[in-house]
Amino acid sequence: MEVEYRRAAVLEVDAATGASRVFASGIRNPTGLQWEPQTGKLWAIANERDEIGADLVPDYLTSVQEKGFYGWPYSYFGQHVDHRVKPQRPDLVAKAIKPDYALGSHVAALGLLFYTGNNLPAQYKGGAFVSEHGSWDRSPLSGYQIVYVPFANGMPSGPAQPVVTGFHSADEKHLYGAPVGLAQDAEGGLLFADDVGNVIWRVSSAKK
């Protein structure tokens, strides 16, 4: 664990001095840090661990609490103990925070964006787009899409809705794309990078 010092964590860095501290810990591969627009709270997506099975462990979307601990490596999705880890730390497992929202196992969520624009239909405003890069060790494949998670009162309020799909063939033998980073352009269009197609795609409402 000595080599894990300040890893699997969200750091807060003073841009002026370079000083830093651990803001939250126990989050394996936190990416896509974003401020939720209604509450101003920090959110992240996380890629969870492998080799427990095709349906474990779910990647997730969660608010990030200051000084919060989210389980890695001792437990997953709250206090589900990973018995492969020795020695265990029941004291840390006892305080592990359960993430707010499960995205699905091995979807490899890599991009997060709270949409604040006016280009896309109004139903998307205020919610979160998540890019799922896709599984590498699971059949059937999971991920390989952009999904939308609706929010209400600063929290997820419904199931994830596929928005952009079709990145692999039906027989799973051909891969056409793998979404990564997300951004919103000046006109409110949704941009996402594709590191298989080596392009940036733009999603916008049809012109009337």
Image (tube, rainbow, N blue to C red):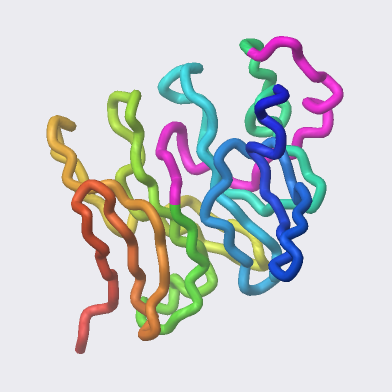
The residue most toward the bottom is 208
Q: Residue at x 76, y 51 (%)?
A: 23
Residue 60 appears in view: no
Q: Looking at the rendering, in which quadrant would you find the N terminus? A: top right
Quadrant occupied by the C terminus: bottom left
Q: Is residue 91 magenta?
A: yes
Q: Which residues are magenta?
A: 85-110
Q: In which image quadrant can residue 72 be found?
A: top right
Task: Give residue 201's quadrant in the image.
Answer: bottom left
- The vertical placement of 50 against 155, above or below, is above
Q: Is residue 107 left or right of residue 139?
A: right
Nearest the eye: 69 or 149: 69
State whether residue 201 is above or below residue 90: below
Percent across and percent down for residue 197 are 19, 52
Residue 68, image x and y in percent? 78, 44
Residue at the spot 82% in from the left edge and 19% down from the top edge: 90
Q: Is residue 38 magenta?
A: no
> In the rendered picture of this protein, how many numbered marks are placed on residues?
0
**Residue at image coords 66%, 73%:** 38
Q: Is residue 53 among what the camera can see? A: yes
Q: Is residue 146 above or below residue 84?
A: below
Q: Residue at x 78, y 51 (%)?
A: 21
Position in image of residue 20 (x %, y %):
75, 54
In the displayed structure image, the side of residue 134 where residue 103 appears, left or right: right
